[in-house]
Image: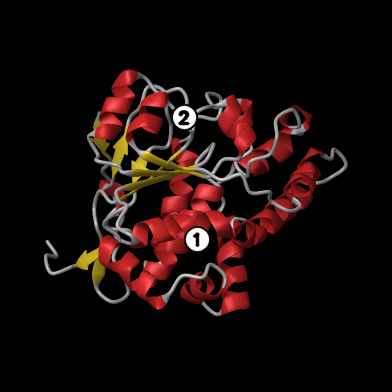
C-alpha cells in the first residue's frame, strides 16, 4: 500500500508528505518529489523514486510498484550483487532495467580499510568520507546513462542499489543539486534512509552500500559496521564538495565529466520540474 508520511518540518515542507511504499519484501522504497527550487519551481510528484534492492518482493509488492507507472529502473549494483540478489523477474519483464558491468577502481581497497581491526572509529569515518568523494567520478558511466534517460523522458524512474543509501544517495543528490533544490532538503532526503532501513533484514551483500563482494562484511568490527550503516550528512557533503571544488558546480560536472549537453540539462529540468503557482 502507499503510505503518506506526515509531520514535515517548516524547513523541509514537502519531505513529510512524500509517498513511501510499504513493501513486504522491499525496503526504503519512496518518492522524491515536492521540493522547491531556488528559481521558484517544484519537483514534480511521481516522477522520481528510490529504493533498496528488489529481489525479495512479493507479487503484491510488484503490483503496487506497477501502479506508479515506473518505466525505467536504474540498478546501480555490480554484477555480483545482481547475481546473488536478482531483481524480481516481473520487473525485468515489464520495465526497462538499466544495469552496468563497469569496474570501479580502488573500490575493494577502500572498503577493505573498514575491515582493519587496528583502526579507530575516526579512521573508519575518514574511510567513508574518502569513499563518498570518489563515487561521483567512479560511477560517471552510470550517472551519465541515468540522467540521459531522464532527459529523454524515460520517467517515472526508480534508482536503486543494494541498500539504497550510498550509490543511490549520490545519484539522487547530484540530480537534485543540479535542479536547484536546497541542500537542506537534499540532506534531509538522504538522512531519511537511516530511519527507514531495517539492517537486520538486509542480506549481507546489501549492507555494503558501496557494492563490495561478499565475505568481507563478517570481518568488520561493530564500530566499523556502525559507521558504514550511517546516513551521515557529512558523507554526502564530502561528495558534493568534491564535485564543486573540481568542476565549480554539479551542472558543470554533468556537462564536463558526464558529457551531458546544456540541452539535456534543460530537458531534465523540463521533465522533473513544474511551476509552483499553487502554493497552498
| Residue in the picture at 72% in, 33% down | 222
* Left-right relation of 255 to 270: right
| Residue in the picture at 32% in, 33% down | 94
Q: Tell me, yes or no, if residue 233 can be seen here.
A: no
What is the x, y in percent for residue 11? 33, 62
Categorize mark 2 by other alpha carbons within 10 Å: few (<14), some (14-19), many (20+). Answer: some
Quadrant containing the N terminus is: top left
Q: Tell me, yes or no, if residue 163 can be seen here.
A: yes
Residue 179 higher or lower than 24, as above or below: below
**For this rendering, which residue is in front, 278 or 253?**
253
Toward which corner of the image does residue 91 lie, by quadrant?
A: top left
Tag 1's secondary structure? helix
Residue 131 higher or lower than 97, as above or below: below
Toward which corner of the image does residue 37 lie, by quadrant?
A: bottom left
Residue 169 higher or lower than 244, as above or below: above
* Left-right relation of 25 to 80: left
Categorize mark 1 by other alpha carbons within 10 Å: few (<14), some (14-19), many (20+). Answer: some
| Residue in the picture at 36% in, 58% down | 150
> Which of pointers 1 and 2 lies earlier in the amino acid sequence?
2
Read off the residue under disc 1: 144
What is the x, y in percent for residue 177? 43, 67
Quadrant containing the C terminus is: bottom left
Residue 86 higher or lower than 113, as above or below: above
| Residue in the picture at 64% in, 38% down | 208
Residue contact between numbered discs 1 and 2, judged by CB atoms under 8 Å: no
Toward which corner of the image does residue 218 lie, by quadrant?
A: top right
Read off the residue under disc 2: 87
* Left-right relation of 255 to 224: left
What is the x, y in percent for residue 123? 78, 51
Residue closest to the far right: 118
**For this rendering, which residue is in front, 50 or 99?**
99
What is the x, y in percent for residue 151? 35, 62
Amino acid at each position: 500500500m502507499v503510505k503518506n508520511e506526515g509531520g514535515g518540518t517548516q524547513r523541509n515542507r514537502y519531505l513529510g508528505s512524500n509517498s513511501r511504499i510499504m513493501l513486504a519484501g522491499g525496503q526504503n522504497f519512496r518518492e522524491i518529489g515536492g521540493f522547491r527550487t531556488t528559481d521558484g519551481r517544484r519537483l514534480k510528484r511521481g516522477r522520481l523514486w528510490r529504493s533498496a534492492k528488489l529481489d525479495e518482493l512479493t507479487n503484491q509488492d510488484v503490483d503496487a510498484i506497477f501502479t506508479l507507472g515506473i518505466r525505467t529502473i536504474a540498478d546501480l549494483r555490480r554484477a555480483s550483487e545482481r547475481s546473488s540478489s536478482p531483481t524480481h523477474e516481473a520487473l525485468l519483464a515489464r520495465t526497462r532495467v538499466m544495469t552496468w558491468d563497469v569496474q570501479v577502481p580502488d573500490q575493494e581497497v577502500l572498503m577493505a580499510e573498514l575491515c582493519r581491526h587496528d583502526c579507530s572509529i575516526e579512521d573508519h569515518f575518514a574511510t567513508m568520507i574518502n569513499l563518498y568523494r570518489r563515487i561521483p567520478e567512479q560511477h560517471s558511466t552510470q550517472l551519465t546513462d541515468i540522467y540521459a534517460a531522464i532527459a529523454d523522458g524515460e520517467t517515472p524512474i526508480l534508482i536503486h542499489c543494494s541498500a539504497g543509501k550510498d550509490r543511490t544517495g549520490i545519484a539522487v543528490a547530484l540530480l537534485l543539486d543540479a535542479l536547484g533544490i536546497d541542500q537542506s532538503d537534499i540532506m534531509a532526503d538522504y538522512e531519511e534512509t537511516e530511519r527507514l532501513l531495517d539492517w537486520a533484514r538486509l542480506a549481507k551483500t546489501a549492507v555494503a552500500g558501496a557494492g563490495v563482494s561478499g565475505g568481507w562484511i563478517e570481518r568488520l568490527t561493530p564500530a566499523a559496521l556502525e559507521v558504514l550503516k550511517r546516513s551521515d550528512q557529512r558523507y554526502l557533503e564530502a561528495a558534493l564538495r568534491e564535485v564543486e571544488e573540481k568542476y565549480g558546480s554539479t551542472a558543470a560536472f554533468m556537462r564536463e565529466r558526464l558529457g551531458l549537453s546544456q540541452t539535456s540539462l534543460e530537458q531534465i529540468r523540463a521533465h522533473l520540474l513544474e511551476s509552483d503557482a499553487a502554493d497552498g
